[in-house]
Every structure is written in structure tokens, then in C-alpha cells.
Image (tube, rainbow, N blue to C red):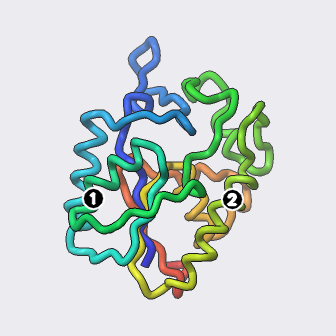
Amino acid sequence: MLYFVRHGATNWNENKNELGEKDPKCQGRADIELNELGILQAQATAETLRDIKFDRIICSPLKRARQTCDIINKNNLPVEIDNRIIERDFGEFEGLPQSKFDFMGFWNAKNEVKCKNGETIQELTDRVYDLLDELEDSAKENILIVSHGGIGIIISTYFKGKPQDGDYMKYAIPNGKYLTFDFENPNF
């Protein structure tokens, strides 16, 4: 079984606009730490997963994912850091609130918004699928992946199929939450 955990919240995830409304900043490769809420979310997920015996733990190299992983990894198993599950490169959109550009278009394969120095959905998919293809050989193991929202979206497409309408955001997962996938029963 594959368990995917999205890291807990950061200040950028909880960013508010001038009206006090939530307007998350794109933090792709920015190495942002968890905030208090993110720590609480990671602790809650750790509690939920406490009875799962993981055979492998794979984590993004970014701080927010590593901190989440450390909180969940109560048994101090070795953690594999894998750059293939680092967040999508947002290029010129890095650090911008989602309201300042076409965020939904950036995550839509049919009309993907282009950005300078950013990663396309296909480039992101290629590197994540490369790891998942390797992990398929370990289908009988319990594997924990701690990473980012964009990675969770792509992992979901691996098991559930790419969205016909191109809207990858339909697979978005909140901070600190987890999903389970089964290589032997992909539609599980």
C-alpha cells in the first residue's frame, strides 16, 4: 500500500490578502518551514497513521516535507530523500499569491498557463511517474511518501487516470492530509 502525505501548513499556505481572505502563495521550491498549524496537522496525521508499519519512507528534500515526515516517523526508520518528489517548479509564479495569476490554468493540461523557468505538468508527471514505476515492484510493502500538493495531484493521476477535462486541481489534497493507493488495485 502506498500512503501519500501532503506536508502541514506553512505561512505561505495560510497567506491572506488585503481583505483578510485566504490567498495562498505559490511556494514550489521555496524552502519554507511548517507553522504552528502545520505542526498540529502533522501530529494529527501521525496519530492517524500510528498503527501502520511502514517498510519504506520517501520524502521531498524541502523543510516543510521533512518536518512533517519527522513528526510522522515515530519509529525513526531511515528516510530516503528523493528529488523526484520535490514540489513543482513555479518559475516566475514562485512566491506570488494564487490570485495574482491564472493558478487554475497553470494546473489545467488543456490550457496550461506557461511561465518562465517553470515546470510543465508533463515534466512534473514524468519525474513522479518514474518513481512510482520503480515502487510498483514493491507493491506488497507499506510505503510512505511525504511531499507536496502538486506531487499528490500527480500521484492521484497515476492511479485514477488523468482528468479528461485537463483540470488537475480536482485531485488537490489539503495540507496535512493523506491518501492511500494500492498498486495491485489501482482504483482502490
Instruction: Read off the residue under disc 1.
Output: 72
Of helix, strand and loop, which one carries label 2? Answer: helix
Three-letter residue code for mark 2: Thr
Residue 10, percent across and down? 38, 34
Question: Are the residues tagged 1 and 2 within 8 Å (C-beta)?
Answer: no
Callout 2 environment at 10 Å: few (<14), some (14 to 19), or many (20+)? many
Instruction: Read off the residue under disc 2.
Output: 125
Say whether residue 105 is left or right of residue 178. Answer: right
Q: CA distance from mark 1 to mark 2?
A: 26 Å
Three-letter residue code for mark 1: Ile
Asked if one can make out residue 161 in the rendered structure from this viewpoint, the answer is yes
Q: Earlier in the sequence, mark 1 or mark 2?
A: 1
Quick one: which residue is furthest to the front in this view?
78
Residue 120 versus residue 51 in the image, above or below: above
Callout 1 environment at 10 Å: few (<14), some (14 to 19), or many (20+)? many
Q: Nearer the viewer, residue 71 or 154?
A: 71
Residue 90 versus residue 58 in the image, above or below: above
Of helix, strand and loop, which one carries label 1? Answer: helix
Residue 70, percent across and down? 29, 54
